[in-house]
Image (tube, rainbow, N blue to C red):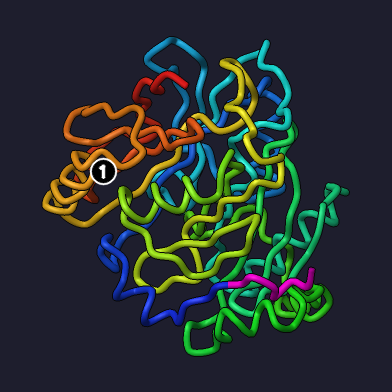
Amino acid sequence: MSLTSDLRTVDYDVAAAAAALPAATRLGPVHLTVTDLARSVPFYEDVVGLTVQWRGTTDTDEPAVALGSDGTEPVVVLVENPTASPQRRTSGLYHVALRYPTRESLGHLIRRIAETRTPIQGASDHGTHEAIYLPDPDGNGLELEWDRPRADWPPMAEEFSRGGPQPLDVESTVATTGSAATEARSAGVDMGHLHLHVGAIRLAEDFYRDVLGFSLIAALPSAIFMSAGGYHHHLGANIWNGPGAPPAAPGSVGLRRWSVVVPEADDLGALMERIERGVGVSHVTDEDGALVIADPSGNAVVVETAAQRGAAPIGHQRPTPPR
């Protein structure tokens, strides 16, 4: 089957109008389980270019470290469980995409990767964005990317019609850094998107469209891409670990929860109305006004307002719902 067989794509403007979530929706911190903070934190600092913003413990007394850039909210919260088992062929994290503000900052990232001799899994030009793929020390997948200006984005159908992502021009990306010394830390890094392994594509599409409120950007039989505001994607989901992939066992390395930040309290109210229609929701918790929801594959997502996110202590941990 060719890559374009059974492909559905939607124009960015049409997708923006179709989303129940407001255009200003963004992603907040992703919480990951790791086995050794002493090993993981230097990787996120020295390779990824983040800065430690908070050290402490979770509500269940697990050691935790929050990392971000510019002193703003964290993008990643690492929680240590020394006995956590490796990721298997389950639902859960495929990759976290951290977004760098400029092509030059991506160039400095590539230089850090080279200077630290860090192995990567790939380097791609998606048309909408350029990206480096690599695992963290526990195998949690990372995509480190820079977005082209929206005016330069090709139609989503064009991305697939050209045979998928093209190789990243690493040399020209690094050339944007000139003769300057390699930046030890990256400013302006935020959450770009999250890509999940799920057990069933149709259930995932129904949940993330009809309950959470994203709209479809592109779909293949084995993967979907969804967003708010006509973004190229805030969320990807695939069945590449096999249809019916079960949730990860408790205590596994990987995704604990991810977060969606909406502008206003009314947006949370609209989400609650969708939840009350009973579309594929297995677990909902109201935590200080924020909602914690488990998707049909057991992936936990926190939905909160910008005011709640801004008021929360850096690295604040809420209990993870049962999986």
In the picture shown, does residue 271 fall above or below 85? below
Asked if residue 282 lies left or right of residue 39, the reply is left
Q: Position of residue 138 (x, y in %)?
A: 73, 30
Is 299 magenta? The answer is: no
Is 3 magenta? The answer is: yes
**On the image, which quarter does residue 170 sit in?**
bottom right
Asked if residue 106 lies left or right of residue 219, the reply is right
Q: Can residue 66 be spotted in the picture?
A: no
**Magenta region, main secondary structure:** loop
Q: Which is more toward the observer, 290 or 104?
A: 290
Task: Residue type at mark 1: give it.
Answer: Glu
In the picture shown, does residue 247 fall above or below 76? above
Q: Position of residue 235 (x, y in %)?
A: 49, 55
Q: Residue furthest bottom?
A: 151
> What residue sits 60% from the left and 39% below the top?
93
In the picture shown, does residue 197 fall above or below 294? below
> What residue sits 71% from the left and 47% below the top?
240
Q: Which is more toward the observer, 30 or 39?
A: 30
Q: Can residue 120 be spotted in the picture?
A: yes
> Mark 1, residues whose alpha carbon is within 10 Å: few (<14), some, or many (≥20)?
many
The range drawn in magenta is 1-7
Identify the residue position indicated by label 1 in the image: 304
Q: Position of residue 279 (x, y in %)?
A: 31, 42
Q: Which is more toward the observer, 320 or 187?
A: 320
**On the image, which quarter does residue 2 sit in?**
bottom right
> What residue sits 64% from the left and 33% below the top?
245
Helix, strand or loop at label 1? It is: strand
Asked if residue 3 lies left or right of residue 228, the reply is right
> What residue sits 46% from the left and 62% below the top?
226
